[in-house]
Amino acid sequence: MSQAVNELPQRLLMGPGPSDADPRVLAAMATPLVGHLDPAFLALMDDVQSMLRDLFRTGNAMTFPVSATGSAGMESTVANLVEPGDGVLVCVNGVFGGRMCDVAERCGATVTKVEAPWGKPIDPADVRKALDLVAPKIVAIVHAETSTGVLQPLEEIGSLVRDAGALYLVDAVTSLGGVDVRVDDWGIDAVYSGTQKCLSAPPGLSPVSFSTRALEALDAREGKVQSWYLDITMLRKYWGSDRVYHHTAPISSIYALHEALRLVMEEGPEQRFERHRVTHEYLRDQLESLGFEFLVAPEYRTPMLNTVRIPDGFEDADVRRRLLVEHNIEIGAGLGDFAGKFWRIGLMGGSCRIENVDRLVSALRNLS
Amino acid sequence: MSQAVNELPQRLLMGPGPSDADPRVLAAMATPLVGHLDPAFLALMDDVQSMLRDLFRTGNAMTFPVSATGSAGMESTVANLVEPGDGVLVCVNGVFGGRMCDVAERCGATVTKVEAPWGKPIDPADVRKALDLVAPKIVAIVHAETSTGVLQPLEEIGSLVRDAGALYLVDAVTSLGGVDVRVDDWGIDAVYSGTQKCLSAPPGLSPVSFSTRALEALDAREGKVQSWYLDITMLRKYWGSDRVYHHTAPISSIYALHEALRLVMEEGPEQRFERHRVTHEYLRDQLESLGFEFLVAPEYRTPMLNTVRIPDGFEDADVRRRLLVEHNIEIGAGLGDFAGKFWRIGLMGGSCRIENVDRLVSALRNLS
């Protein structure tokens, strides 16, 4: 055996997630277990659902954390709503839009893509045209594309989707907790997130929310949901008032999410979004002074995921390795065509602090 | 908000899982996060795989924890091996065999059942007959049925399955870490377990192992695996030497599993199985003296899950509630037809201690 986990290096996590979990969240993970049907645990579940509804700005009853990471949340929303042959319009301008296509096709969907170049937002006019052409059951889109750092405006497309009578499915993995996600106001019917980004809990859960319209579509299915584990028709009997056993809930991860959400509520969602905005602007100024250029135009930038072109004088892999080994700072490599040319610098939740930006910038000056 | 998690009651977990996690495992959960591609984390992953291979008694390269609970492990083994139209023979003598049928049908399998009454093992002669009739691609069976406490002998059926040229798929959720699970010797091609039973880590991961024959069947698939999240063709590039990102691994849960497996190896698997056997016998003697009768014949009893008929003088729901509220002890209710008539008392991993049996029996004497 190489080492015990308490001998692991102490990193500063400034990549695309996970982010640094607060000591209170880590302490919550170490709480002794209770059973998944214990009344004390059921009360915690109620709390988690209530805080998630507040953060998602929704009254949706079926708001809860799926018992696996964000990609399983994606699969949960898609698998519950798609039946073989259903049309799904997927907006693709990065890795995670592409992943949605793959997941939807595995569920038997007929996928149509609306594309934009990596680093650009999806154009509502393109969505409108595609809606007229294919009349899909579902339109799927990513709010904050973790592969590029594009923040997609959701409201205008949401009203097009609603006018077309389709369901609106949104990836909020990287956005939730760092910018506003207004599920009800924006007409979102199914949304999924992750715990390890701006919520700064450990990875392992995917908060999701389903609208009444989405649940009606679920009830109208002809066949069973293809995934037993993710089947909302059964899960709502555990997360709803029936409390019927489905699978053993990941108790400790729910403890951590509970504490992470308490931290969000103590700080205040608006104050938290403002902290992300201000820290992002500070990082931007610092990086630009070092010669980094942002991939995304200012009006479409996510504050929590900053994709920057690596300037001359920095060798990609070597600098990232030395940042990690010599300075204990993790940043993210570029994906796809951006590998070797761009970095992705995260400012997510607990990691999003002015002093962390200073530490990173000071290390970068050292390594240039 | 009702309460912080550190105000939760401290329970003794003697139900069907989760079991009590060791303080070292809980402390591991609280370790600050590192990234899922951090070299220090990759080394931990190697450790976990190596210890799981030792415990599963296998040389299978593709041995790793699925990033979700045991039921997702079930879905992982089934979804990767089944293509639409494939024949699957499922042995059913309790809830979890029944669940396998449901999961397999959702993957498009043509399911044939070999049944035995709840509380009885599956008869190899029945498997032989069914193999002759339907020549399935896969035979699926539960090692330790958590709904009844039957320990199924696996070796004889394994050799029938191998002779028939089928793949042998085994549920070891409740058995792994409490009794021997000999993957290679018994000809098992795909196996899944859970962390929250006899491994006594928190729920959230499902250790699985796939044989070379299983991976050959995977490679020979015509279509993609229907679950993106559970697709071994991609996951083996992360858990294998390529280290290609698939989804963000549940870092903290893997810390906990790492520490839980170290505890298993420090104790020694054989010594751990012996502890389960001896403690079970002690519990049996104590319960029989109180008038409880075991559902399962002695030669087929699991040591870690004891299903007993509730004698006169104990009112099911009231006694379980008072055990929990007044004594902080959780035991399990009967499932299905056994509700109200039987209890399921767990002796799993960290909960499997003579002093815990004494505490339970003393509380029961109090409540009768």
Image (tube, coloured by chain):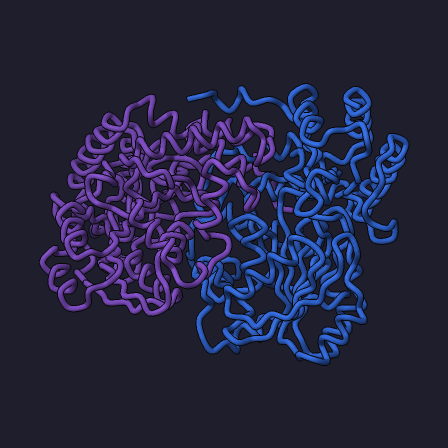
Chain colours: A purple, B blue
Relative image position of residue B265 (x, y in whole percent): 73, 45
Q: Is residue B337 above or below residue A202?
A: below
Q: Is residue B257 above or below residue A130?
A: above
| Quadrant into which the N terminus of chain B falls | top left
Tell me, yes or no, if residue B254 can be seen here. no
Q: Is residue A224 above or below residue A44?
A: below
- Which of these two is toward me, B6 or A79? A79
| Quadrant into which the C terminus of chain B falls | top right
* Displayed quadrant of residue A303: top left
Q: Is residue A178 above or below residue A27?
A: below
* Displayed quadrant of residue B215: bottom right
**Residue A217 located left or right of residue B174:** left
- Which of these two is toward me, B34 or A302? A302
Q: Residue furthest left?
A: A125
Tell me how many marks there are.
Answer: 0
Q: What residue is drawn where x is 32% and y is 59%?
A: A100
Tell me, yes or no, if residue A30 can be seen here. yes
Relative image position of residue B11 (x, y in whole percent): 65, 26
Q: What residue is drawn where x is 60% and y is 34%?
A: A35
- Which of these two is toward me, A344 or A271? A271
**Residue B314 located left or right of residue B224:** right
Q: What residue is drawn where x is 42% and y is 56%?
A: B245
* Displayed quadrant of residue A89: bottom left
Q: What residue is drawn where x is 66% and y is 57%?
A: B171
Relative image position of residue B178 (x, y in whole percent): 75, 46
Relative image position of residue B237 (x, y in whole percent): 48, 63
